[in-house]
Image: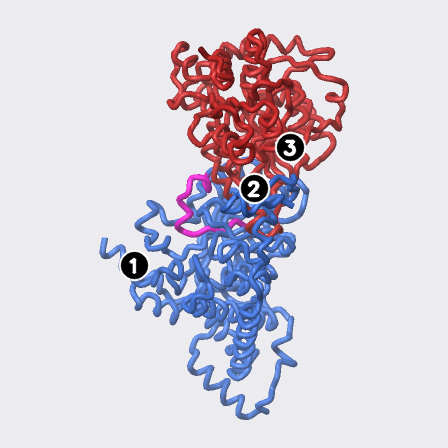
Chain colours: A blue, B red
Amino acid sequence: MAMAMARWRQRLLSSACSSSSSSAAAPQALLRLASSALSRQSSSRGFAAAPDDTTPFVVDIPVPYAGHRCDPPEQRVETSAKELVDFFKVMYVMRRMEIAADSLYKAKFIRGFCHLYDGQEAVCVGMEAALTKEDAIITAYRDHCTHIGRGGTVLEVMAELMGRKSGCSLGKGGSMHMYNKEGNFYGGNGIVGAQTALGAGLAFAQKYNKQNAVSLALYGDGAANQGQLFEAMNISALWDLPVIFVCENNHYGMGTAEWRSAKSPEYYKRGDYVPGLKIDGMDVLAVKQGVRFAKEHALTKGPIVLEMDTYRYHGHSMSDPGSTYRTREEISGVRQERDPIERVRKLLLAKEIVTVADLKNLEKQAKAEVDEAVNQAKEGGQPETHELFTHVHVKGLKQLAYGPDRKEVIVPLP
Amino acid sequence: MLPGIVRSSSRHLPCRRSLTKWMSVRNLAAASGDQMTVRDALNSAIDEEMAADPKVFVMGEEVGEYQGAYKVTKGLLQKYGPDRVLDTPITEAGFTGIGVGAAFQGLKPIVEFMTFNFAMQAIDHIINSAAKTYYMSGGQISVPIVFRGPNGAAAGVGAQHSQCFAAWYGSCPGLKVVTPYSAEDARGLLKAAIRDPDPVVFLENELLYGENFPVSSQVRDPNFTLPIGKAKVEREGTDVTITAFSKMVGFALKAADELAKDGIKAEVINLRSIRPLDRETINASVRKTYRLVAVEEGWPQHGVCAEVCASVQEESFDYLDAPIERISGADIPMPYAANLERLALPQIEDIVRAAKRACYRSK
């Protein structure tokens, strides 16, 4: 048992940059190279040239895919300088946003539940690189970054977290209930596992409407044992629904490690007759390639399960320090070996798309963007009192709704 | 469909052997002219709404090839095809979630539960995914879905197949809950429910499916709807108000006949809608009669009648000449033996007795 645990811990920490030739082999050497290059050039170099370049080039994906009832895609993916820079930018913004949420929660600007996504950014960013806004996404409660990926703004996330009317759900949802109808993002769901059946329903509608689009239903390793997931998989396979079930396996369902909750933690195989693919969820390019493969599969052959091998740095939520069921060495180990943003940073520097100074600038911009959004959100007002009774129905029948004191507060529902 | 045919490995099997179902199948032939069975009313309502709006579809167990466990969806598969009439596996949580997800995307599902007892396996989706989403999303995601099926006691189907869920769903903001009684109710309310942009829980009654009711040509019109949230005064009276819904409306009307023989003119209100509850009509009636008997088939504690009572004592306290009476199902799981089952459910004599008590005429 102890040996199995040790092996499991080792797997969590395994280096992402094992065998590739085109990803950074010696980051320290390259950083010295990059900074010496900087000293030869003008220090005011902006992003005019290489970072905007959309010329495609191919990058190897170091950690091998594992397929279940399917042949995995190629271990290499096309990308461009611009795409990598965009990946860096948006992941960094997401990282800063989640860290800001941590501080705001401790300062009591955010109440209730707050489940942070830092560490897992590559999953939602890589996904979006393979999807369009015609595709639909639904996830559970760890949804702040997924909301950004679907086109939401940091301001509306922050405002929603702080319960302001400028929030994406008008302050009436909170951390776990962020939605973006225009971006085809259906939340933001608090009941573990429910979103998997809902996601299959989104795909049902896409098929019914003959859209050439897919739905992605995201769930965690904790939700992967839910009965309704298997019910949804059965119907999806039976009816050929264009749904992709994405297990964001961060290896802990709250405080319970995967080997303590799942007889078979090979979540990509749990679909049985539904094919599956295991993907290094800390590698944004691997995610992009995997989701592109899955989308094609879902549109032509039916549902597929993706297991994203990922990791969350924070605990399950802000009430959980995250260190009672895992060691600090493990957390810092993953941060050191597999951080998704560091991956992209190394690649950008290795390909000489940006300099260290450029990246520092990007980081500064991202931090400023998040800080600005936080300040703006803080200035925003709470919802008006009458909003208590709005949005109960689309078509209120003028029936009377009551407040706690029925004689005091009586409102005909709009 | 011959009730004698038995399917293996179906946990819903006991429903199909009820004696009343035999009779209701034979009654199919009787619906004609200015009469219509509740079953035909429901069938025609779904049919017309599916014809009018391509976004409407039906899903549930046995709704397609079997023609519906209670034949409510008879003929629809043949008419609209398997893309719009979908037979689901026996997985309520899964297929209800799928229905709600489809509604998120703007389709208009009609999800049939073979009985609402099985909907308990899907109740999380009805409440947390359907009822609350429009509110939680600040008005972004609406859920135009109908959950329908038989509710309450049938005949001899035992404890797990006899529960009335009107009170549970009726307490939940975000849902609309309707309980048709007659064929007119069934047609009008189901069409309204399907057209409604919000989630509607549509509670039918198995024993009413085969009953014939008179219907006017207005009711037969494809655009006939009834307003959700409005009760109907089925019978006017001056001495005591009796509220009821679903099958109990029939019992209340018969009780009113009995009471009339003793010179008590009862006003019978068919609630039609549990949520919103038509407090106006109920209170207006009590302000006329000064006495109330609230009737329901389900359990009394925290039941629909409790809400009716609360509403009347809050709003019409000064008008009451007697304490409010409640007639409801017994506080027990439903027994099987016929004599015990009869004792577990409200009977006409119970309603008559309570009305007389309210009129201080029991001795």
Report how far apart the C-alphas of labels 3 and 1 lie in the structure: 52 Å
**Magenta segment: does it hold B292?**
no
- Quadrant where the image shows the C terminus of chain B: top left
- Quadrant where the image shows the N terminus of chain B: top right
- Magenta stretch bounds: A214-230
Dot 3 surroundings within 10 Å: few (below 14), some, or many (20 or more)?
A: many
- Amino acid type, residue under disc 2 in the picture: Gly
- Residue B262 lies, in percent from the top left, at 55, 8
Q: Nearer the viewer, residue B176 or A121?
A: B176
Q: Quick one: which residue is furthest to the left in this view?
A: A2
Dot 2 surroundings within 10 Å: few (below 14), some, or many (20 or more)?
A: many
Residue with the mark numbered 3: B228
In this orientation, does residue B87 appear? Answer: no
Q: Mark 2 or mark 1, which is nearer to you?
A: 2
Mark 2 — on which chain does it sit?
A: B
Residue with the mark numbered 2: B174
Q: Nearer the viewer, residue A164 or B11?
A: A164
Residue with the mark numbered 1: A325
Q: Quadrant of residue A202?
A: top right
Give the residue at x 53% y 63%. A76
Give the residue at x 40% y 57%. A250
**Magenta segment: does it hold A225?**
yes
Query: What is the secondary structure assignment of the residue under circle 2?
Result: loop
Q: Are marks 2 and 1 in contact (CB under 8 Å)?
A: no
Dot 1 surroundings within 10 Å: few (below 14), some, or many (20 or more)?
A: few
Say whether mark 1 and mark 3 are on the same chain: no
Instruction: State left or right for residue B198 relative to residue A142.
Output: right
